[in-house]
Image (cartoon, rainbow, N blue to C red):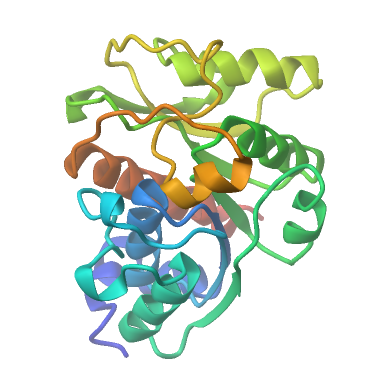
Amino acid sequence: MQEKYSRTDLLLGKKEAEWLRGRTVTVAGIGAVGGYALEGLARVGISHFILIDFDRISYSNINRQIHALESTIGMRKVDVARDRVLDINPECTVQIYPEFICKDTVAELLGHATDILVDAIDSLSPKLSLLEKAYRLELPTVSSMGAALRTDPSRIRVADLMNTTKCPLAKHLRKKLRRRDVGEGITAVYSEEDVIYDYQQNSDIGNESDDQRQFRGRQRNTLGSLPTLPGMFGLAVANTVIYKLLEKYSQP
């Protein structure tokens, strides 16, 4: 165990890293961004995860999702993610909830003790419900904006959601959240790369699977995406979570 995390200990400090490994992280959305965020957090040694995603792995996920393999097609994402986390760290505890996040379920799904929330949902209505509830609970949150359509990793940024620039999704979320009296306090990972996409006209982020679209009962737009940018978004989310948690360690 000591050797497994030795390089993390060298960088962060042994006491800080040990404290970090005792935290609980909730990850909502185990897709492209969420899968890579979970990977980074599992490898730093987080000891308890709460994973939320009702979807199953499909062939269209293979180009960008770390859990999507020929051998996992059709399996529930939370099951595959749990098994991978436990293969990295058998001492970890992983709670899974194959549930759809919406205004009717979000209170229950966020009703478990956790230190921080990762929002990697790629549908607007569930994302809004999740972020609003987390804000009301004063739950520290790192939220990923859209990684689809992006090609330039040098444009990835981290800022408060209310202070982001050039991201159409963040702009749309800000407008909706302000109407719900949600203010500063949600950390966003986003890109300043120029893209053309109207979230006013399209009610999803564009990476939903066929199962997700069927669940909603209507067709969604599908956006192009490379394997690279969603992974970079996810690891940026994980890195942001690590240092936000360590801020708690340094507090008196």
Q: Quadrant of the N terminus?
A: bottom left
Residue 124 % position (x, y):
59, 30
- Above/below status of 18 relative to 172: below
Q: Is residue 74 left or right of residue 139?
A: left
Q: Quadrant of residue 218?
A: top right
Q: Quadrant of residue 71?
A: bottom left
- Which residue shows up at 56% across the image and 24% down it? 203
Of residues 113 and 230, the one drawn nearer to the viewer in this rendering = 230
Is 173 or 61 nearer to us in this picture?
Answer: 61
Is the C terminus in the top left, top right, bottom left or bottom right quadrant? Answer: bottom right
Left or right: where 19 falls relative to 69: right
**Image location of residue 98, percent across then percent down:** 60, 66
For residue 129, what is the image quadrant?
Answer: top right
Q: Residue at x 61, y 41 (%)?
A: 216
The structure residue drawn at horizontal position 32% and vertical position 40%, both measured from the top left corner, is 233
On screen, residue 95 above or below 219: below
Q: On screen, 94 above or below 169?
A: below
Front-lying residue, 58 or 100: 58
